[in-house]
Image: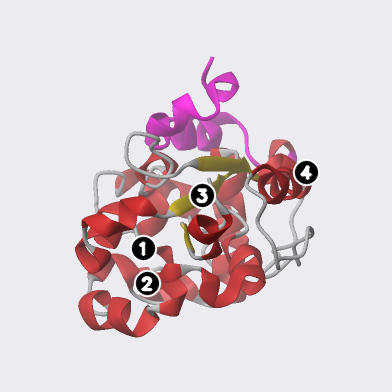
Amino acid sequence: CNQKWVYSFLALQIPKTASSSIQATVGERNLIFKHRGLVAQKFSKHPLYRGIFDTRHLIPQHCVEVFGRQVFEFFSFCCVRNPVERILSSFYFGNQNKLNHVYGLRDGTTLSEYVKWLYNNRHRKDILILLPQTTWADNKIFPVEILRFERLKQDWADLLQKYQIQGLPDFLPHENQSQHKDWREEISGENLKMILDFTQEDRILYPELYV
């Protein structure tokens, strides 16, 4: 693709997959952020984007509703993450930012209680963290490229080189980092079973987890 085509693009931002770090780097070159006023006008009251999980995390279907069919002419990418690690990160991030109140969870909710709550609500469509990552990372619609959180430093540098994207640093800051142990030290047994159940649609991205 040529230089003009990739100057503005869609940086699809899946919650807890380095989305804040990527947005801090690309700024208004991301069409979703550049036109955030238009996006907010159309979707600010949508239940999916309530609280801190706002319109920055616009799903592809809603991108088309905002920008029309012309959106397919732009380069797009997203980043995916180990689904179990992503749920663990969302728990700690939620605790740090008091997001329990967004969904009616009590202060001091434990990890096991959080996982059970997600499992019991797994069929709801208004909880952003419960949407499968394939909602964004569907190559039949978007994006052109899928980065991996686990190797993001290399994938980001490769992306810039492959598409000759100029004017962006080849490193990413670590924004909204939540401190926690490796997921294998914190999630096992029934909690792991429940997470693998309600993240089944991400099997295509991380098949090794679901054997």
Determine the main secondary structure of the stretch shown in magenta.
helix
Pick the quarter of the image with the C terminus: top right
Residue 53 visible to an observer of this rendering: no
Q: Are marks 1 and 2 in contact (CB under 8 Å)?
A: yes
Residue at the spot of label 2 = 55
Amino acid at circle 1: Leu
Amino acid at circle 4: Gln
Element type at marker 1?
loop
Q: How far is the residue under mark 3 from the one under mark 4? A: 15 Å
Q: How far is the residue under mark 2 from the one under mark 3? A: 17 Å
Q: Are marks 2 and 3 in contact (CB under 8 Å)?
A: no
Q: Which mark is residue 77?
A: 3
Q: Which mark is residue 129?
A: none
Return the residue nearer the eye: 186 or 124.
124
The correct choice, above or below, for 103 with respect to 120 in the image is below
Dot 1 or dot 3: first in sequence order is 1
Dot 2 or dot 3: first in sequence order is 2
